[in-house]
């Protein structure tokens, strides 16, 4: 299952290729349409998925195909993207889902219509090297000098991190005022973020498409005006962060 929409155009679906090289189709109920694709249980059954999700090449190809279908749907109207590998065993179960949660789906579709998700990641800026202290005799002995340097470096780092947290909080407040909704995710690891610095904020912002430029300019200003942090804009993304359904 790729997404839930109001009414996908058949010609749009016919031009798409799904995660198993299938052509997506729609199942309708309660005035809604689920965009789905028929996939083999040999690859997408429960046991097979546990195995395949550990295959990074398979996962990358499937994620790209899944995202491509969703982006194509969003390009022509509001759509609620489903998580990767959301599988139902038959059309009737999909219809039951649409009917039982129609009100919630309709509410989310209204929220994401004409809006796009943008990510903002805030990293600690490098701590500048402190110049040697002027005046007074140096500490006696090499050990004392080393401990003094270590203590000064730790104090400087703690002050820098405290300022960074304060600045990140201000950035969050400024950007939240320009967004329709905000989600805060756990900071990513250095490897996943592709950055050697420590991430201290990983925010997702649902922004009206008419205000995209203003939002991007605000992010750039936040990056320039705060010396203890670096602010990075990512996106645009399908509104995954704002499409999570509440547990039934």
Image (cartoon, rainbow, N blue to C red):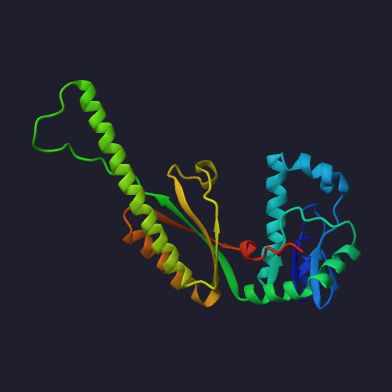
Picture quarter with the N terminus? bottom right
User: Who is closer to the viewer here, 103 or 220?
Assistant: 103
Q: Quadrant of residue 66?
A: bottom right
Position of residue 32 relative to residue 144, above or below, is: below
Above or below 129: residue 87: below
Which corner quadrant of the image does residue 33 belong to?
bottom right
Q: Nearer the viewer, residue 219 or 136?
A: 136
Q: Residue 108: image x %, image y %?
A: 68, 72
Q: Is residue 243 left or right of residue 248?
A: left
- Residue 77 visible in this rendered orientation of the protein: no
Looking at the image, residue 153 lies above or below residue 208: above
Rendering coords of residue 65 (x, y %): 71, 55
Q: Position of residue 76 (x, y in %)?
A: 68, 73
92 sits left or right of 17 in the view: right
Residue 121, how many percent across, how many down? Answer: 48, 55
Residue at 35%, 51% in the rendered image: 162
Report whether 25 appears left or right of 57.
right
Between 240 and 38, the one lying in front of the other is: 240
Q: The C terminus appears in which quarter of the rendering?
A: bottom right
Residue 92, visible in the rendered structure:
yes
When asked about the image quadrant of residue 73, the answer is bottom right
Q: Image check: 114 left or right of 99? A: left
């Amino acid at each position: 299952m790729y997404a839930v929409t109001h009414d996908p155009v058949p010609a749009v679906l016919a031009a798409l290729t799904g995660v198993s090289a299938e052509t997506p189709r729609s199942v309708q109920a309660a005035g809604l349409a689920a965009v789905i694709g028929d996939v083999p249980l040999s690859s997408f059954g429960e046991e097979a998925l546990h195995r395949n999700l550990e295959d990074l090449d398979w996962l990358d190809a499937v994620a790209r195909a899944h995202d491509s279908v969703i982006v194509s749907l969003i390009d022509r109207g509001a759509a609620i993207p489903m998580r990767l590998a959301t599988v139902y065993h038959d059309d009737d179960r999909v219809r039951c889902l649409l009917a039982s949660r129609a009100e919630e789906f309709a509410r989310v579709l209204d929220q994401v219509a004409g809006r796009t998700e943008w990510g903002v990641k805030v990293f600690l800026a490098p701590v500048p090297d402190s110049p040697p202290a002027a005046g007074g005799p140096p500490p006696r002995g090499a050990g004392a000098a080393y401990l003094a340097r270590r203590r000064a470096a730790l104090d400087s780092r703690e002050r820098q991190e405290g300022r960074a947290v304060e600045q990140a909080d201000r950035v969050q407040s400024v950007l939240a005022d320009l967004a329709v909704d905000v989600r805060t995710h756990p900071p990513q690891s250095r490897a996943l973020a592709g950055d050697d610095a420590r991430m201290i904020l990983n925010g997702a912002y649902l922004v009206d498409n008419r205000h995209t430029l203003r939002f991007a300019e605000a992010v750039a200003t936040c990056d320039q005006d705060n010396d203890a942090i670096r602010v990075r804009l990512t996106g645009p993304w399908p509104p995954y962060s704002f499409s999570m359904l509440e547990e039934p």
